[in-house]
Every structure is written in structure tokens, then in C-alpha cells.
Image (cartoon, rainbow, N blue to C red):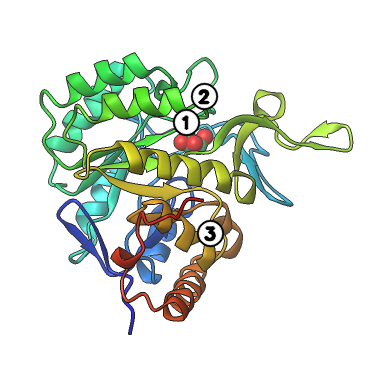
Amino acid sequence: MSTLKTSIGNFQFDTCVMNASGVHCYDQSELDGLRASSAGTFVTKSATLQPREGNPTPRYKPVPLGSINSMGLPNLGIDFYLDYLKSVEVGKSSPFLSVTGLSREETHTLLNKVQSSDYDGLVELNLSCPNIVGKPQLGYDIEGVKKLLTEVFAYFDQPLGVKLPPYFDLTHFDQMAEVLNQFPLTFVNTVNSIGNALYIEDETVAIKPKNGFGGLGGTYIKPTALANVHAFYQRLKPSIAIIGTGGVTSGRDVFEHILCGASLVQIGTALQEEGPAIFDRLQAELLEIMTEKGYKSLDDFRGKLQYL
Ligand code: SIN
């Protein structure tokens, strides 16, 4: 019998699929739904210091090959998510607490708050939300990321990872990996949505914020996501695990993310559309592929993408 067990840093997970931050993780009922599902773990909606309502609606739209969103970081604030994680029995699989500051100062305030709380599990610092007017994604400012991580690791000693935007140039993979390798990061999560896409129906944009510009997710972005997973797998030091996110709708997609080097795989658009039962289907499909190929564990094929 094959196993889907995996690990990130010192944390073990019974299976390799989970939600992507922003999907099914806003409030108690959505988070409880993830905990009751067969996902290996879960991540909370990226928290800011204060609760946020987010951008005007409609701000998410499923489209034929994926989705476009400009949610604008609606969340219940860091205190809610810290309280939630304190109140639930999370067992041996750590959840991921996602945080994102709207400024450098807010990021430090958030991480200091996490560090002085009872929560000592995994933390994801989101550097890649494309949907806040006037706030560029820090992930595209490579020197800015270096400065921020230098400041953060001067005091933060919990297991920390970063959620990155997609990169599109080999030079940017090189430069970003060179920066990330300088820090004791536990993981890198790649990719967030492809920012500032435009979807048009008849003569009109599909979502209201930013006159229709929003983050693209789903099947559209799988090749970009796989490229980012593999590019960072090739470049990052082995102690930094990779979480693959983007374009997963089937067990075959999960397989490809792992083949490219992912240790955990997150589901966004497809989870939004199908609900938490998707985790059962993805695992069954992945196990079928592994059985056909004679793979007993994820280590048998993780990162072993073949070249021509
Ligand atoms: C949003 O809330 O706008 C999406 C969050 C993200 O893409 O990081």
C-alpha cells in the first residue's frame, strides 16, 4: 500500500494536500470544515492586524479555465486566527498561520504578536497579495524581501515560510533563490495567483475592484506554478521545503507538483468550486497513479522530473 505521508521541517503530515490560503479558511465554520476533511493540514486566511472587509463585490468569479479574484484580504484579524488555533485540537499535524502586513511595520507587529502568543507552529508570511490598491507585491522587490527577512530573523524563531508570487524570468529565480537561501526559512510556497489579469464577458469585466484587474488562478496557471516549483527546487538549499500551489484540479496535477519538487500541495480555485470533499478525490487519484507506477511513497518521485 502506498503512503502520501510528507513533512515540512520537523512537522509530519499524513497526506500531502491542503487548502491554499484564502480558500475555505476565513472563519470558524470554514476552518472547522477543513479540519473535518481529509486534508493533511490547513492554512488560515492571511491575517492583518485589524479585521478587514476587503474589496467591493463581486470580487471572485469562476471562469471556464480557473478563476479571477480581487478579494482585498478580507479577514477577521490576527487575534481571531490565533484564538482559533489555540482553541482547536490540531493533533500532530501543525496548521499554518498565514499573516501579511500592509506595511513593514505591520508585518513586524504581526510576527511579534505571533511570537509572544501560545501558537508555536508553522507561520506563512504572505509576500504576494496582488489585490491591494497602492500596495505592490513585496515579492517582486527582491532587495525589499532581503531587507524584511533580515529584520524578521533578528527576532523571529518560529518555523517560518514565505508565499511568493510567480516569477517569469530565470534571472529572477536566480536572484530570489540567492536571497531566500541566506535565511533559515522552513518553506517557500509557490505560487500565489498571477496578479492583475483581466477577464472580459461580452464587453464587461468580470469583477468589480480595480476595474476588473485581479489574480488569476486555476488551470490557466498550472504550467507557471510547476515552473516556479521546479525552479526553486533546483535552486533552494535542501532545508527549505517547497509547497506547490497553482492549477490543481486532479490527482495528476498533485503528482506533477511533487514531481517538480513540492512536499505539500495546496488547492485554491478547485477547492472553492468543489468543497472539501475534493481532498478525497485528489488522494484517490494520486494513489492510483502511484500504484500504476509502482511508487510506494512521495520520496520515490519527488523532484525527479525527467528532462529530454
Ligand atoms: C486577496 O485576499 O486579495 C487574495 C490574497 C492573496 O492573493 O494573497
Q: Residue at x 25, y 53 (%)?
A: 85
> Pointer 1: what residue?
129
Q: Is residue 184 shown above or below 14?
A: above
Whole-angstrom CA distance, mark 1 to mark 2, is: 7 Å
Question: In the rendered image, which quarter is residue 48 located in?
Answer: top left
Q: Are marks 1 and 2 in contact (CB under 8 Å)?
A: yes
- Residue 31 in the image: state x and y as whole percent: 39, 58
Asked if the beta carbon under badge 2 is closer than 8 A to the nearest atom of ligand 1, the reply is yes
Viewer-proximal residue among 14 and 172: 172
- Residue 86 in the image: state x and y as whole percent: 20, 53
In the image, taking residue 278 as reference, residue 3 lies left or right, namely: left
Q: Is residue 12 shown above or below 291?
A: above
Instruction: Say few, some or many: other residues with alpha carbon within 10 Å of mark 1 (under 14 / 14 to 19 / 20 or more).
Output: many
Q: What type is the residue that disc 2 sits on?
A: Ile
> Pointer 2: what residue?
132
Q: Residue at x 48, y 30 (%)?
A: 167
Q: Residue furthest bottom?
A: 1
Whole-angstrom CA distance, mark 3 to mark 2, is: 23 Å
- Residue 159 in the image: state x and y as whole percent: 17, 42
Q: Residue at x 57, y 61 (%)?
A: 249
Q: What type is the residue that disc 3 sits on?
A: Leu
Asked if the beta carbon under badge 1 is closer than 8 A to the nearest atom of ligand 1, the reply is yes
